[in-house]
Amino acid sequence: MIDIQELTKHYGGRTAVDALTFRVEPGAVTGFLGPNGAGKSTTMRMVLGLDRPTAGRATVLGRPYPEIRYPLNEVGALLDARAMHSGRSARGHLRVLAQSNRIPTRRVDEVLAQVGLYEVAGRRVKGFSLGMRQRLGIAAALLGDPAVLLLDEPVNGLDPEGIRWVRDLMRGLAAEGRTVLVSSHHMSEMALTADRLIVIGRGRLLADTTVREFVAGHARRIVRVRTPHRDRLATLLDGAGINHVLSPGDDEHSLQAYDTEPAAVGDLAASAGLALHELRPEHASLEEAYLGVVAGDTEYRTALTGVPVVPPHQGA
């Protein structure tokens, strides 16, 4: 497992990671989420011994990473797909890593085939696209058949087939009992891939839970309604104190009610004899829950960040 205890990192007067404590258990894909500047990459670098903590500690399989003699055999990592010698071939790059960690040379071609690069193994890395570099970085992480993997934005630059392949790979590795920590800004992918979430903001822990519990606890409940009497229903919802918005555009018969149940909306409509053509709950999304949690911890905001996503209805 990965065990992080009171991990702290200061850069001058700025705190990048602030007394962070969490554990990443084997047998699950754990998503590591947070806005830009939240401290995700710094945390992963400290786990891998690339940055020295100001305070606290991080261990992998019970030891600090620098104490592992042949680390690729126990921990695989992808932090930056560009961090490889561009003059080497894909096969040459992996052979250097294999030799330095006492990994059999035959393993190089095995992982090249696994990530779909076997046919271009002799090409120099400088001619690779970002997606091909990502695949090569993943091959390097898998080279020693490690029990622990840390992947930072592994689907960047990949096409839809590649994204699905990475998703299946991570879930397959976790099913084998490995520890998988993956940092990503792709909320839709995390919703499909991750079992658990670690969410941080401004270097602090905001959530450590399952995906299901995170969404249920932080996303708003939405009820979608279609009725030929939309304006009358909106007036009833106003009177009941139920927030709602009218659907934009040419759809004159739809609205969305928030933080309520379909039965409550249906009962209001029935009390006024209003016909409903559609009444259904809408599944909350991981993206909505995530944005709600990190709203106050986002370092770089656009001009629209402070505008409520779902403002109360101001009248028909």
Image: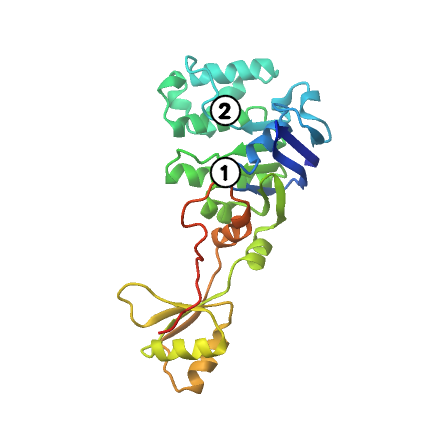
Q: Distance between the residues labelled 2 and 1?
A: 35 Å
Q: Can you say whether 42 is above or below 284 in the image?
A: above
Quadrant where the N terminus sits is top right
- Seen as rendered, the residue at the extreme front is 13
Residue 36 image label:
1
The x and y percentages for residue 93 are 48, 16
Q: Looking at the image, can residue 13 be seen?
A: yes
Work out whether 207 lies above or below 23. Answer: below
Horizontally, residue 139 falls left or right of residue 148, namely left
Q: Three-letter amino acid code at disc 2?
A: Glu
- Tell me the SS state at disc 2: helix
- Report which quarter residue 19 is drawn in: top right
Residue sitting at 71 percent across and 30 percent down?
Answer: 55
Which callout, 2 or 1, points at the residue further toward the start of the chain?
Answer: 1
User: 50 left or right of 242?
Assistant: right
Residue 29 picture location, percent across and down: 58, 42
Element at label 1: loop
Which quadrant of the figure contains the C terminus? bottom left
Which amino acid type corresponds to the residue marked 1 in the rendered image?
Asn
Colour basis: rainbow
Q: Can residue 1 be seen in this view?
A: no
- Which residue is nearer to you in this view: 189 or 172? 189
Circle 2: is it few (<14), some (14-19), or many (20+) Cα within 10 Å?
A: some
* Circle number at residue 110: 2
